[in-house]
Amino acid sequence: MKARIPNQPAGGNMMKRLQEMQENMQQVQEQLAQAEYTASSGGGAVDVIVNGSHEIKSVKIKPEVVDPEDVEMLEDMLVAALNEAMRKADETAEREMGKVTGGLEIPGLNGMF
């Protein structure tokens, strides 16, 4: 019985697939970094927009919620809106990267998004 010799080196197809996955991941990362996520708090009194790189792009505050006697409430609304926008960005990144990696746990990427 003769041994069968493959046409390509062992793992050649796997390396090609990994390279394609890496290229796809880079494209997705670039798209995610540019995407914007909006969140509100206080029934729309505070609106924020962040991008996928966690940069704050915009903060809008309705004038009627600016009360010099209750600055703490405004601060709380800002924190709540910003945290929600960041959570949306992270969830989207996880979901989109999961599509590219097929759910593989890749060392170094866990916790990155």
Image (cartoon, grey):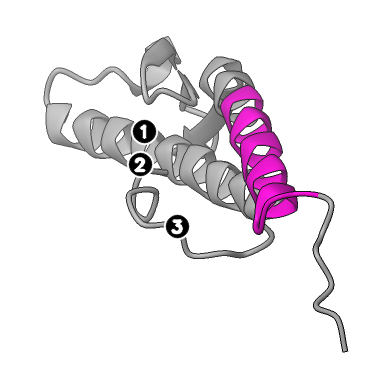
Q: Do the CB atoms of the residues marked 1 and 3 lie less than 8 Å apart?
A: no
Which quadrant would the N terminus be assigned to in this image?
bottom right
Q: Determine whether 98 is above or below 75 in the image.
A: below
* Residue at mark 1 to residue at mark 2: CA–CA distance: 4 Å
Query: Residue at (25%, 29%) from the top-left corner?
Result: 74
Q: Amino acid at mark 1?
A: Leu
Q: Amino acid at mark 2?
A: Asn
Secondary structure of the residue carrying numbered label 2: helix
The mark that comes first in sequence, 1 or 3, is 1
Mark toward the viewer: 1 or 3 = 3
Horizontally, residue 46 falls left or right of residue 73, namely: right
Query: Residue at (71%, 46%) from the top-left corner?
Result: 17
x and y percentages locating residue 60 in the rendered image? 45, 12
Q: Nearer the viewer, residue 113 or 68?
A: 113
Q: Do the CB atoms of the residues marked 1 and 2 lie less than 8 Å apart?
A: yes
Can you identify the residue that label 1 sits on? 82
Can you identify the residue that label 2 sits on? 83
Q: Quadrant of residue 25?
A: top right
x and y percentages locating residue 31 in the rendered image? 64, 21
Q: Amino acid at mark 3?
A: Ile
Q: Nearer the viewer, residue 44 or 10?
A: 10
Disc 1 crowd, CA 10 A, few/some/many (<14, 14-19, 20+): many
* Residue 12 drawn in magenta: yes
